[in-house]
Image: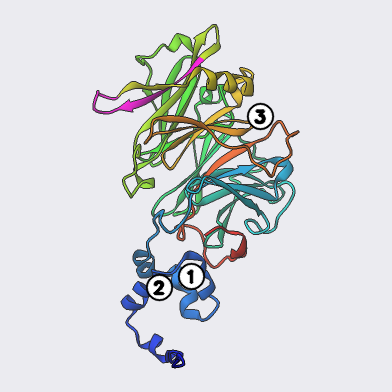
Amino acid sequence: MPRCQSSPEMDPGIWSKLPEELLYCILSFLSPKTIFNLRSTCKRFKSLLLDPCFIATYSFSSSNFSSFLLLSHPHFNRHFPLYDTLSCSWRQPTSSRSLLNPCTSSSSLLSSSSGVLCFYLPASSSFLVANPLSRASTTVKFPKLPFSFEIITLVSFSSGFKIFVSSSSSVFLYDSRSKSWGRFGGFDSVLNDSFHQGGVHRDVQLYFTTCDPFSVVCFDLETGKWRTWFDELELPTNELAFVRLAGADNAEGEGGGIGIGKLYMVGGVGRNGISRCLKLWALSEKEGEKWIEVETLPELMYKKFVSVCYHNYEHIYCFWHQGLICICCYTWPEILYYRIARRTWHWLPMCPFFPEKWSCGFRWFSFVPTLYAPGICCDNIYCTFKNIPS
């Protein structure tokens, strides 16, 4: 039998002679983990993440990366379990030493936007905005000292990011493009219901709900002005025990996913402030911007939901994740979610890495890894790739 001959090695000089467009096309077929391993071979590959041409060539779609639900807890603040929503399985907890440097016991994760995370660092009086996949971070100092706040929302754009912070009767807004804070008037009634619910980003606006009287208000991220968007709703407002908003901005769904660009509302309906059922509404622009009832949570699932929150509605918060409307409780380690494409309700499997005795402090975040995040310095290398899922 003839002996197989090994293929000759490729002349290293060929790589330097390839046109950049062809080289970028070849590299675009590699996995994200391989791309990062190549960065240590030469300066040219190391600079790939800073090259707009390569970024435009490389496909940053969901086909290259998994999407995750990230779980945070104050007693487990050095690790963040990840639930892969594509494979429907839990990943081993990711050490925050790979996400945050220095890692301190007082640091906490407060907000997320796509693949960018915002940490609170009280020891250094700052926020840390980080992209775990590209290993880049930017430190943002507090706008004043001392500084306390109630609500924080991170919003990432194609040109940078903004941090919305509600503090007392004021709103502070950080813009990564100008690297400065702005101060604007607040809207106190937004804070009456839940401190765990951030703003919902849609069309350069952040949307919130007020509970007394019930309305939907929005904050313009460009002008810094508030306006009441809905003050008279065709909903049983006198029967609403609580309401939460969720939705995905058009910029988050370049692939044209179902539900992208829509605004959804989750509400507990009942009497005398006691919820008897859970309903979901969607804002229909075709109907002249009216709220249309979409679904009602099945009775058996609602009984479990009530047993979880014990009618403490201030602990309930919602967010959007890749076609899922996630309904969470600060005191329970599970997620109730609605899958828009199938119009079905589900409970997420409980995290196997947390002790069952923990009963408070559970914070969930949407985490969709992205290789490039404008406004974050890629030269500030702070983590290793081995703990970041590919």
* Spatial CA span between label 2 and label 3: 45 Å
Mark 2 lies on a secondary structure that is helix
Compared to residue 172, the image places residue 372 above or below, namely: below
Q: Is residue 281 magenta?
A: yes
- Decide: is 24 above or below 218: below
Evaluate if marks 2 and 1 touch, with contact meaning CB atoms under 8 Å apart: yes
Give the spatial CA distance, label 1 vs label 3.
Answer: 40 Å
Q: Is residue 121 magenta?
A: no
Q: Which residue is mark 1?
A: 35
Type of secondary structure dominating the magenta stretch: strand
Q: Magenta part of the protein: which range?
A: 277-289
Q: Which residue is mark 3?
A: 331
x and y, in percent, of residue 157 in the image: 41, 50
Residue in view at x 46 percent, y 66 percent: 31
- Find residue 81 and report its horizontal and vertical position in percent: 63, 47
Amino acid at pointer 3: Thr
Please, what secondary structure does the residue beneath circle 3 have? loop
Q: Which residue is mark 2?
A: 27
The quadrant in which residue 75 appears is top right
